[in-house]
């Protein structure tokens, strides 16, 4: 990462709050927090967008769309962070999480869950060829207009954030409390860090 990020010792205001949250949760400030803190107004706007998305679809559907998009992009940052968030929120269990990020079949997920995952993956890999049929699959699964828009925004927002981190070559910190070592390796591999994952095995 070639950019110079705000020094935690000199951080103030919103940036200091961001750094403090990381320190209280994990004992260090994440590289992705420091990178985004270079433009705190943009980060605050992104968080405002997320807060506007979640109420209509709930945290579970939001995390499903987020994880599917992150896996499709190959974003280890977001897979590790949101894998842990999804587990802590009890949106998914460890087996479901592993199946979601690897694309394995999971009969414990509902038809609506699978519709969200398929839509988020397609948006993240082949958006130019999407048609009414893609959104219709969400409607057929029971989602209304607002929810269809917010599922779309959730997946698109993850593309924005994940790709920004990748473009800035932000380092991946994965020594996260609350993640089983095997599951952490699965998430790393799904994010394109297969060589590192194998070395840890």
Image (spheres, rainbow, N blue to C red):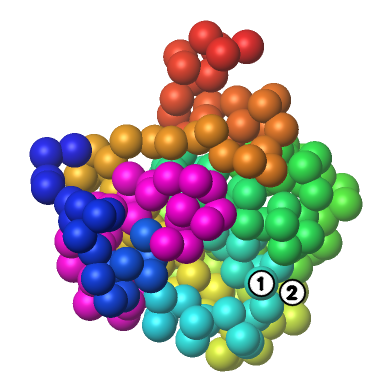
Which disc is residue 190 wearing? none
Q: Residue 30, relative to residue 144: is it above or below?
A: above
Furthest-front residue in this view: 9
- 1 falls in the magenta region: no
Residue 179 in the image, given as x and y percentages of width and height: 67, 38
Residue corresponding to mark 2: 141
Tell me the quarter of the image containing the C terminus. Answer: top right
Looking at the image, which residue is at 53% across and 27% down? 189
Image position of 50 (left or right of 200): left
Looking at this view, is 105 or 53 the one in front?
53
Instruction: Pick the quarter of the image with the N terminus.
Output: top left
- Image spot of residue 4 (x, y percent): 12, 47
In x, y percent, where is residue 90? 78, 60
| Figure quadrant of residue 59 | bottom right
User: For mark 1, does the 10 Å Cα neighbourhood hold few (<14), some (14 to 19), or many (20 or more) residues?
Assistant: some
Marks 2 and 1: in contact by CB < 8 Å? no
Quadrant in which residue 46 is drawn: bottom left
User: Badge 1 is on which residue?
Assistant: 59
The magenta region covers: 20-46
Whether 180 is drawn above or below 70: the answer is above
Which residue appears at 55% of the width and 74% of the height? 151
Residue 60 position within the rendered picture, expressed as x and y whole percent measured from the top left: 70, 67
Nearest-to-viewer mark from 1 and 2:
1
Q: Residues within 10 Å of mark 2 (few under 14, many from 20)?
A: some
């Amino acid at each position: 990462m070639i950019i110079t990020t705000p020094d935690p010792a000199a951080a103030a205001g919103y940036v200091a709050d961001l750094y403090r949250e990381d320190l209280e949760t994990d004992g260090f400030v994440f590289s992705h927090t420091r990178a985004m803190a270079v433009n705190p107004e943009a980060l605050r706007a992104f968080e405002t967008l997320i807060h506007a998305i979640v109420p209509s679809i709930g945290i579970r559907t939001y995390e499903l769309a987020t994880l599917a998009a992150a896996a499709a992009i190959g974003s280890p940052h977001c897979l590790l962070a949101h894998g842990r968030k999804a587990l802590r929120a009890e949106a998914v269990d460890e087996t479901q999480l592993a199946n979601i990020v690897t694309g394995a079949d999971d009969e414990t997920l509902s038809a609506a869950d699978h519709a969200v995952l398929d839509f988020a993956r397609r948006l993240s890999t082949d958006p130019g060829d999407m048609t009414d049929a893609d959104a219709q699959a969400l409607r057929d699964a029971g989602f209304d207009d607002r929810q269809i828009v917010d599922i779309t925004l959730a997946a698109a927002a993850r593309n924005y954030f994940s790709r920004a981190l990748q473009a800035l070559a932000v380092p991946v910190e994965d020594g996260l409390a609350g993640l089983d070592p095997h599951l952490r390796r699965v998430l790393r591999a799904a994010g394109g860090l297969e060589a590192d994952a194998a070395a840890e095995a």
